[in-house]
Amino acid sequence: MHRLQVELGERSYPILMGESLFQKNLITPYIKGKQVAIVTNETVAPLYLEQLQAQLTDYQVQPIVLPDGEQYKNWQTLQLIFDGLLKAEYSRKVTIIALGGGVIGDMAGFAAACYQRGVNFIQVPTTLLSQVDSSVGGKTGINHILGKNMIGAFYQPQAVVIDVSTLKTLPKRELSAGLAEVIKYGLIADSDFFTWLEENIEALKILDTAVLIKAIDWSCRIKAHVVALDETEEGIRATLNLGHTFGHAIESHQGYGNWLHGEAVAVGSVMAIEMSMRLGWITEQDRNRAIRLFIRAGLPVAPPEKMSANDFLKYMRVDKKIIDGQIRLVLLSKLGEAIVTSDFSTELLNAILSTNYEQLLDSF
Ligand SMILES: NC(=O)c1ccc[n+]([C@@H]2O[C@H](COP(=O)([O-])OP(=O)(O)OC[C@H]3O[C@@H](n4cnc5c(N)ncnc54)[C@H](O)[C@@H]3O)[C@@H](O)[C@H]2O)c1
Ligand SMILES: [Zn+2]
């Protein structure tokens, strides 16, 4: 088993990762008191709820099973978590366990931040995306019809327990979506990781355990490092949002759940990379390497055909990185290094939003 620490002073916590962790008693040391609520969804519950519950025979356990989908990451569904907690008469001593992907983790975490002003919380992520990204770092929340992740809180878990065996049941499209965030780390923070991914992308796609654990460990290390430097995103943490300003616009415009988050991030990253190239910061060769890797990972690299520059701008105007009305973007200053900047012309942004990426791809 691998262990990695997220260093946040008194809010520090471990990320435990390995195979078949549900068989080992790793979660109970992080539970406080006797009351446990497992928040999960209709897809994940039949697969893993029983295995997790089998570890918790000494506790009073209440499963809270939500409908599955990004379109349910909202107030109404959040309320179901509070209903479950209150019906079980759970006190401030309850521990909430999130069992599922990023949608469950974000909602259960936000519920943990709010219930009786904050209760104990453990992440058990079961998608690649949640194992490398959303379960680490304490961002929790829900969507609003006018913007993604607009309502939320920073709230750190007591532990993150990653069982890579759970990825065996994950649909391939979801696995690819997770790879988008993995590739993102290479692009923004570590060109060696990017090169390693170019060499290992096929092994990752067929879930080679050793390669998978290395990729998750590498990703979590980068994320943990950035979060430790800037927990509440005053600066460097925003670089983790490469491709997300464009990507969130795609997700919102297309209707939550139609495009997967990772798919939208892949396309958004390509747009940010194209922009970085036109600013003269990265070479055409590096842009092409990035596009090729996204394609090999099974991801889209062009925005929805019918989405206009104005469609993008409508959603980009409510992005969380906006300061005093100015759109700020994460761009690459070189391969393996990112900056957050508003130092680009409106003309360039419009050109990026109006580029025909399908045509750009003809050479691939
Ligand atoms: N908090 C953060 O820092 C952060 C970072 C990145 C993304 N996010 C959020 O995460 C969400 C996306 O997360 P996601 O990609 O995990 O999507 P998801 O939670 O919707 O899970 C994807 C699908 O896989 C199913 N599933 C989960 N585990 C499974 C398993 N082991 N086997 C079979 N099916 C399984 C789910 O039920 C769902 O249908 C978005 O809402 C995004 O905004 C948050
Ligand atoms: Zn993301």
Image (spheres, rainbow, N blue to C red):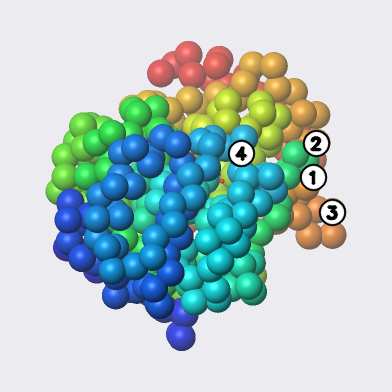
In front: label 2 or label 4? 4
Q: Residue 25 in the image: x percent, y percent?
A: 20, 65
Pointers 1 and 2 in contact (C-beta within 8 Å)? yes
Give me the residue at 53% from left, 68% from top: 90
Q: Quadrant of the C terminus?
A: top left
Q: Residue 64 in the image: x percent, y percent?
A: 49, 50
Q: Which residue is mark 4?
A: 72
Q: Residue 170 in the image: x percent, y percent?
A: 33, 34
Give me the residue at 55% from left, 73% from top: 91
From where the camera sits, is residue 133 visible? Answer: no
Q: CA distance from mark 3 to mark 2?
A: 13 Å
**Position of 274 compared to 348: left or right?**
left
Q: Is residue 218 above or below residue 251?
A: below
- Mark 4 Cα-neighbour bin, 10 Å: few <14, some 14–19, many ≥20: some
Q: CA distance from mark 2 to mark 4?
A: 22 Å
Q: Which residue is mark 2?
A: 314
Q: Which residue is mark 3?
A: 325
Mark before the other along the chain sequence, 1 or 4: 4
Mark before the other along the chain sequence, 3 or 1: 1
Quadrant of the rendered image containing residue 237: bottom right
Q: Decide which of 133, 280 is in the foreground and name it.
A: 133
